[in-house]
Amino acid sequence: MKRSEVDLVHGVLNIHETKGYAQHYVALHDSMTDLLKQYDREVEKIYPGRTYFFENAMGNGYSRQWVVYIFRKLWEKANGKNNRPVAYELRHHYAVENINRWEEDAFGFSEKLLYLSKSMGHSEINATLYYYSIVPGMSDILREKTETGFNEIIPEVPDEKE
């Protein structure tokens, strides 16, 4: 990711050329924006005028393989070698935890799901719901959270035999 794609004033990442070549924006939590500002100040002292936000000593961005390797090393250091997740599982966890903590409010579940889907770079909500569907027991929670609103929009049709 180039430095020009990281807006530290507004706390927004401009993600492009991703899977499917879709561009999207990710709004950062204030605490993450503060960490990235601190990182940027310190690295700028070592590599002034760098092109990439996270730049290696050769002046390039880090590869996917490097990220996977470092993630695994850090995970094993903190958790041992018994459980070996992949970095992509963090994305799954992010989706599921967001959905689980939503309460009915003025924005509603559907709108939040749309925002989450777009922030993850999905072109369809079903791609986001997939993360939720592969977790055992989650389909019941999802139905519980959405059934009331769904039933208000589409009332039950009486049985033809009645």
Image: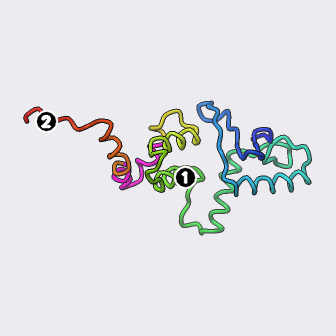
Looking at the rendering, the stretch of residues picked out in magenta corresponds to 128-142
Q: Position of residue 106 (x, y in %)?
A: 48, 47
Q: Which residue is mark 1?
A: 94
Q: What residue appears at the point 70 percent right and 42 percent down from the top-left corner? A: 13
Q: What residue appears at the point 80 percent right and 53 percent down from the top-left corner? A: 37
Type of amino acid under label 2: Asp
Mark 1 neighbour class, 10 Å CA radius: few under 14, some 14 to 19, many 20 or more: few
Marked residue nearer the N-terminal end (1 or 2): 1
Type of amino acid under label 1: Tyr
Q: Position of residue 65 (x, y in %)?
A: 68, 47
Relative to 47, say whether 22 is above or below. Answer: above
Relative depth, front residue between 144 and 3: 144
Disc number for residue 34:
none
Q: Position of residue 36 (x, y in %)?
A: 76, 53
Q: Quadrant of residue 115?
A: top right
Q: Which residue is mark 2?
A: 159
The quarter of the rendered structure image containing the N terminus is top right
Please report contact status of discs 1 and 2: CB closer than 8 Å, yes or no: no
The quarter of the rendered structure image containing the C terminus is top left
